Amino acid sequence: MYKRQESKLAGERINKMEESDIDRIRTAYFLTLGRMPNSSEFELALKFVSENTSNKQNNIWGSLIHSIISSVQFRYLD
């Protein structure tokens, strides 16, 4: 539950910080993993966001953050 709440807050922050979905995706990766997404990560995130445009009121950016921090890469940062 804590992770979901923090993801939602981070998603709201990213949504306010950036104006385009492209910049929001890059910011989401940079803030959570300390790096920009690689090409396949970026394409997958963009597809996820594009397919869920009606879900933006339900905090699609929080969902993206949640998926990033649930990744193995987040748990094993160098």
Image: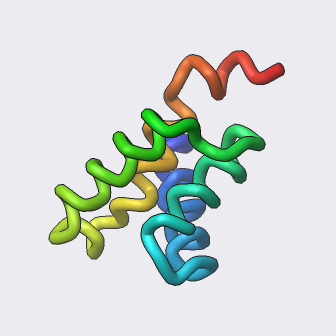
Q: Please name the residue shown 21% across and 68% down the image.
A: 53
Residue 41 point in image, percent of width and height: 46, 37
**Figure coloring:** rainbow
Task: Tell me what residue is drawn at x 24 percent, y 61 percent.
Answer: 50
Residue 18 in which image quadrant: bottom right
Q: Residue 77: name its quadrant.
A: top right
Number of callouts: 0
* Left or right: where 25 falls relative to 78: left
Query: Which corner quadrant holds the C terminus?
Result: top right
Please name whichever residue, 13 or 45, is drawn nearer the observer in this view of the structure.
Answer: 45
Residue 42 lies, in percent from the top left, at 46, 45
Q: Residue furthest front?
A: 39
- Depicted 77 relative to depicted 53: above or below: above
Give 16 or 37, whichever is nearer the viewer: 37
Residue plotted at (51% across, 74% down): 15
Q: 53 above or below 45? A: below
* Of 51 and 11, the residue lying toward us: 51
Question: Above or below — where is 57 with respect to 44?
Answer: below
Q: Residue at x 48, y 59 (%)?
A: 8
Q: Position of residue 49 (x, y in %)?
A: 31, 58
- Side of 50 where 34 appears, left or right: right
| Relative horizontal placement of residue 45, taking residue 6 as reference (left or right) | left
Q: Position of residue 67 (x, y in %)?
A: 44, 37
Q: Quadrant of residue 21?
A: bottom left
